[in-house]
Amino acid sequence: MRNFIAAVGVILAAGPAIATERAYVLIETAPTATLRESLENNLQNCKALLANIYPHEIIAHLECNELADINIAVAQMAKDAGVIRATLWLLMKGQ
Protein backbone atom coordinates (compact mmCIF):
# COMPACT_ATOMS: atom_id res chain seq x y z
CA MET A 1 0.00 0.00 0.00
CA ARG A 2 2.81 2.42 0.79
CA ASN A 3 4.37 1.90 -2.65
CA PHE A 4 1.07 2.74 -4.32
CA ILE A 5 0.60 5.94 -2.31
CA ALA A 6 4.15 7.04 -3.11
CA ALA A 7 3.63 6.34 -6.83
CA VAL A 8 0.37 8.33 -6.89
CA GLY A 9 2.05 11.20 -5.03
CA VAL A 10 4.80 11.38 -7.64
CA ILE A 11 2.28 11.36 -10.48
CA LEU A 12 0.23 14.12 -8.89
CA ALA A 13 3.29 16.23 -8.17
CA ALA A 14 4.58 15.86 -11.74
CA GLY A 15 1.30 16.82 -13.45
CA PRO A 16 0.29 20.41 -14.15
CA ALA A 17 -2.34 21.98 -11.92
CA ILE A 18 -5.66 22.26 -13.73
CA ALA A 19 -8.01 24.99 -12.58
CA THR A 20 -11.65 24.03 -12.72
CA GLU A 21 -14.76 26.05 -12.09
CA ARG A 22 -17.21 24.69 -9.53
CA ALA A 23 -20.82 25.51 -8.81
CA TYR A 24 -23.76 24.34 -6.73
CA VAL A 25 -27.14 24.35 -8.43
CA LEU A 26 -30.57 23.78 -6.85
CA ILE A 27 -32.84 21.85 -9.21
CA GLU A 28 -36.56 21.74 -8.52
CA THR A 29 -38.30 18.89 -10.33
CA ALA A 30 -41.84 17.87 -11.19
CA PRO A 31 -43.34 15.18 -8.92
CA THR A 32 -43.13 12.49 -11.62
CA ALA A 33 -39.67 13.41 -12.91
CA THR A 34 -36.96 10.76 -13.07
CA LEU A 35 -34.06 12.68 -14.56
CA ARG A 36 -31.02 11.69 -12.55
CA GLU A 37 -29.30 9.89 -15.46
CA SER A 38 -30.25 12.69 -17.85
CA LEU A 39 -28.62 15.31 -15.63
CA GLU A 40 -25.47 13.28 -15.01
CA ASN A 41 -24.84 12.24 -18.62
CA ASN A 42 -25.87 15.21 -20.77
CA LEU A 43 -23.52 17.91 -19.47
CA GLN A 44 -20.74 18.72 -21.91
CA ASN A 45 -17.31 19.43 -20.39
CA CYS A 46 -18.77 19.10 -16.89
CA LYS A 47 -19.16 16.45 -14.25
CA ALA A 48 -22.08 16.49 -11.83
CA LEU A 49 -22.53 14.96 -8.43
CA LEU A 50 -26.23 14.91 -7.55
CA ALA A 51 -27.83 14.68 -4.11
CA ASN A 52 -31.54 14.62 -3.32
CA ILE A 53 -32.37 16.82 -0.35
CA TYR A 54 -36.18 16.63 -0.52
CA PRO A 55 -38.48 14.53 -2.71
CA HIS A 56 -38.52 17.07 -5.57
CA GLU A 57 -35.28 18.97 -4.99
CA ILE A 58 -31.78 18.03 -6.11
CA ILE A 59 -28.51 19.78 -5.41
CA ALA A 60 -25.95 19.39 -8.18
CA HIS A 61 -22.26 19.98 -7.55
CA LEU A 62 -20.84 20.86 -10.96
CA GLU A 63 -17.21 20.85 -11.91
CA CYS A 64 -16.40 22.26 -15.33
CA ASN A 65 -13.31 23.24 -17.29
CA GLU A 66 -14.47 26.79 -18.03
CA LEU A 67 -16.95 29.28 -16.61
CA ALA A 68 -18.86 29.26 -19.91
CA ASP A 69 -19.36 25.50 -19.50
CA ILE A 70 -21.18 26.09 -16.21
CA ASN A 71 -23.53 28.52 -17.94
CA ILE A 72 -24.23 25.97 -20.66
CA ALA A 73 -24.75 23.16 -18.12
CA VAL A 74 -27.25 25.17 -16.04
CA ALA A 75 -29.12 26.13 -19.21
CA GLN A 76 -29.23 22.46 -20.27
CA MET A 77 -30.57 21.47 -16.85
CA ALA A 78 -33.31 24.09 -17.03
CA LYS A 79 -34.43 22.80 -20.46
CA ASP A 80 -34.98 19.22 -19.25
CA ALA A 81 -38.66 18.21 -19.36
CA GLY A 82 -38.81 17.27 -15.65
CA VAL A 83 -37.11 20.42 -14.33
CA ILE A 84 -39.28 23.22 -13.00
CA ARG A 85 -36.41 25.54 -12.05
CA ALA A 86 -32.59 25.44 -11.92
CA THR A 87 -31.00 28.05 -9.64
CA LEU A 88 -27.26 28.74 -9.40
CA TRP A 89 -26.46 28.87 -5.67
CA LEU A 90 -22.71 29.24 -5.44
CA LEU A 91 -19.89 29.68 -7.93
CA MET A 92 -16.26 28.99 -7.00
CA LYS A 93 -13.53 30.16 -9.33
CA GLY A 94 -10.71 27.74 -10.10
CA GLN A 95 -7.21 28.51 -8.91
Image (tube, rainbow, N blue to C red):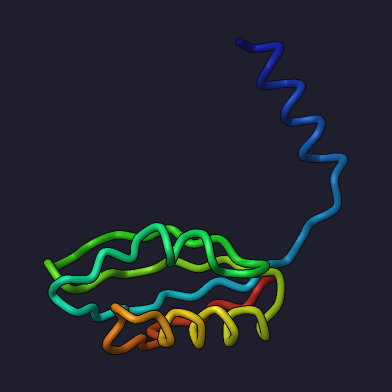
Q: Dividing the image into 4 quarters, which one contains the C terminus?
A: bottom right
Residue at 24% x, 81% y: name it. Answer: 28
Residue 43 placed where, x, y %? 56, 69
Q: Position of residue 94 (x, y in %)?
A: 66, 72
Q: Where 30 falls versus 34 (above or below)?
A: below
- Would you say 88 lies left or right of 2 here? left
Reply above or below: 46 against 76: above
* Residue at 38% across, 84% down: 89
Q: State how many labels appear.
A: 0
Where residue 2 appears, as percent x and y from the top left, is: 64, 12
**Which residue is rendered at x = 60% and y = 10% of the image?**
1
Q: Which residue occupies the foreground of this view, 55 or 91?
A: 55
Q: Nearer the viewer, residue 67 or 36?
A: 36
Is residue 32 shown above or below 77?
A: above
Q: Which of the 4 quarters of the picture holds residue 67?
A: bottom right
Residue at x 46% of width, y 60% of height:
40
